[in-house]
Amino acid sequence: ETADDAEADAAATDPAAVADVQPTPEQYDALRDEVRKRLEAARKSGKLSAGGKTTARQPKPTRARAAGKPEASAKEGNAVYKLHPDGVVTEVFRESVMVLGLHLDEANGRLLIATGSEGQVYEVKLAQRENAVLQDLDAEQVTALHPDGTIVLGTANPATLRTLATEPQSGTYTSAPLDATQVSLWGKLLLAFDSLDEGKTTSIDIETRTGNVADPDTAAWSEWASVNLGIEGIKPASGLLIAEVTSPPARFIQYRLTMRSVDGHSPVVERVELAYVIPNLRPAITSFTAAYGETPEDPDEATPTVVNLEWEAEDGNGDRLLYDIQAKPAGENGWLTVAEDQTETSFEWETKALPDGRYAVRVVAHDRLDNPKGSAKAASRRADPLVIDNTGPELELTDNNGQITGTATDALSPLAAVEYRVSADDPWRPAYPDDLIYDSTTESFSFTLPRLAKGGHVLTVRARDTRGNATVHAQFLTAD
């Protein structure tokens, strides 16, 4: 073991030796980074952890708490409580910060709280039970508050002494980013105020900036720009200030108020409102289907001729939508209006009277109900190409001494089956295609008639396509 190792071992077991070891600047920086990370995590999670291992635990109470004990706050963090003369305890402050110093300013009914690790001093108005950041210093921690006429602040990292003005001359408030949900045009800013005397327009400055990402620290926002008071300006009689926002259109906006005391008068802002308008957005049709109902299994049932149209649509402005349904045969340019100004998102289209063929079908959404002429927008979407086929196949038959051959042809749909029977009382028998599978619009087939009794008979042949359309051919036969 070297001398350095022995000295290190001794320091590890000797508290006095440990006390003499001074942290390096790098260790201070690492500690500050760790504290900052834990505070940021606490603000997101609402829980503040000191880290490390716990060597002892407080036993849980086994009896009911005394009456008047405040209930646990739903908000996590460190807290400051007020103990009343009658023994009642109330919570006056709770934030995810380290509380390092307190000063009760009874004359002004407020409590000042020094915190770390962002060097903030909070002011708690006890009567109103409101708190706000009074000072946000460059130092990492405000470790002490010393009242002696003027309040002296002691800070660490770096170590400084500062005085807190009894009556601050100015202060700045920056709002959180406000979300318009879409890129918007910003209009007027209305500010309700108190104690802003006429003619003292320098007592409050208003600035705004805009961007399209929620966090201005992670993306480019516009520069801070002063609002334009215009001809409306300040209205002391009504306690209103109306100004035009000069920042460019964007989804998010922040406003910043810099307030200054003038001749002992301090402005008090009670409310801020921002007007904006989202440009009219084009509707969106997210899906559109066109399909016939199911083909009946029983060939004797009627084939459906109604096409079921269904779609889904949305509008980014929340506008009411009207729908037009249009169709056109393949190769044609003009659209046929099937229905217009529909409010539902489904429609039953009867195609029985239309010529057979391939059709394009579309639905058009309009937002003209909630937008003036010239600014209304429309969007359309086509369904998959639709085949309108309400006609059965054509049949050709040849009888060669009881050996029947034939051809079934359909203009649009593949053949599904060919069947025959010799008597109305006989069951239908399948006629197999020459290639053993029905899979095209033209199929050749053959079958042999059973031995027939002497006399006349009626041969019936039925051909069906995949749409369910059937054609029946009947011919008279004579058996010798």
Image (cartoon, grey):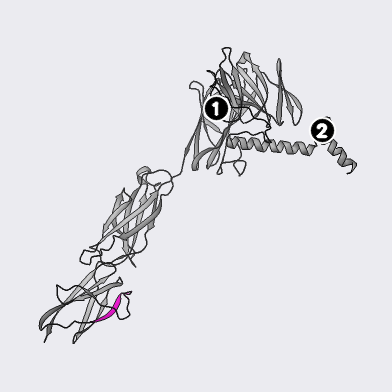
Residue 274: x and y in percent read 50, 34
The residue to which callout 2 is attached is 18
Quadrant of the snapshot with the C terminus: bottom left
Residue 197: x and y in percent read 56, 20
Between residue 268 and residue 245, name the one nearer to us. Answer: 268
The image quarter in which residue 54 lies:
top right
Closer to the observer: label 2 or label 1?
Answer: 2
- In the rendered structure, which segment of residues is drawn in magenta? 437-448
Between residue 80 and residue 316, name the one nearer to us. Answer: 80
Between residue 4 and residue 145, name the one nearer to us. Answer: 4
Residue 380: x and y in percent read 38, 55
- Residue at 32% across, 63% down: 328
The residue to which callout 1 is attached is 73
Quadrant of the snapshot with the N terminus: top right
Residue 454: x and y in percent read 10, 84
Q: Amino acid at mark 2?
A: Val
The image quarter in which residue 431 lies:
bottom left
Q: Furthest residue to the top?
A: 85
Identify whether 275 is placed above or below 409: above
Identify whether 29 is placed above or below 333: above
> How far apart are the two marked residues, 2 and 1, measured between alpha carbons?
39 Å
